[in-house]
Image (tube, rainbow, N blue to C red):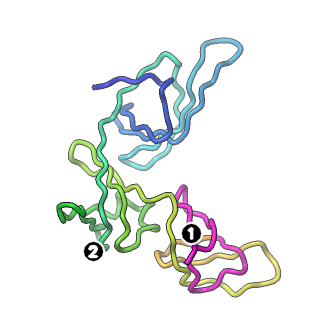
Amino acid sequence: MTMISVNDFKNGLTIQYNNDIWRIVEFQHVKPGKGGAFVRSKLKSLKTGAVQDYTFRSTAKVEDADVQTKTMQYLYNDGTSFVFMDMATYEQLEVPETQAETEAKFLKENMVVNIIMHDGKTLGIEVPNTVDLVVKETAPATSTGSGKPATMETGLVVTVPMFINVGDVLTINTAGNGSYVSRANK
């Protein structure tokens, strides 16, 4: 077990804290005029997906979590699980839908993703920062308003500019709930 100082926090670092495994989403070192320095952090649980704020004294140490990432290809959804294939060994892995609810709206067949594992258990799916998705349904353009909803091929609903039409391929930011970035380069 390796202990790391909270002063060494980096975005994306994985730690073990309060009987859970967390990925650091963001952090801030604070040095108030009075009192000791501390580190404010936003941590995402890799087991539940919940995001929580934690504050640590600058002298605190936390345990480094030994997580592995496997690069795998998404094959299909069998109705209860997402099925992935290790591209080196052709071994298949099933991830229950309940464990990938957030990522599901970005998954396309044959997409390459990282599967996060700890002690042989699958903790989650890490999708690319952006994905290109086809618009399946959207309202016609109107002269009022700055945006309109569009349903993507995966079922994700995104607010897009008025000039977007059905069939357009859009680049979507996967952080949070997904947001429109631009039209994809064809």
Name the image quarter holding the N terminus.
top left
Of labels 2 and 1, the one closer to you: 1
Residue 77 placement (x, y as % from top left): 31, 73
Q: Nearer the viewer, residue 55 or 9?
A: 9
Q: CA distance from mark 2 to mark 1?
A: 26 Å
Residue of label 2: 78
In which quadrant of the rendered view does residue 30 lie?
top right
Residue lying furthest right in this view? Answer: 143
Q: Is residue 3 magenta?
A: no
Residue 120 placement (x, y as % from top left): 21, 47
Name the image quarter holding the C terminus.
bottom right
Residue 58 placement (x, y as % from top left): 53, 19
Magenta segment range? 159-186
Q: Left or right? Give the position of 87 relative to 150.
A: left
Residue of label 1: 171
In which quadrant of the rendered view does residue 39 lie?
top right
Q: Pointer 2 and pointer 1: residues touching (CB < 8 Å)?
A: no
Mark sitting earlier along the chain (2/1): 2
Q: Nearer the viewer, residue 118 or 90?
A: 90
Q: Is residue 178 magenta?
A: yes
Neighbor class of circle 1 (other Cα within 10 Å; few <14, some 14-19, many 20+) is: some
Amino acid type, residue under disc 1 in the picture: Thr
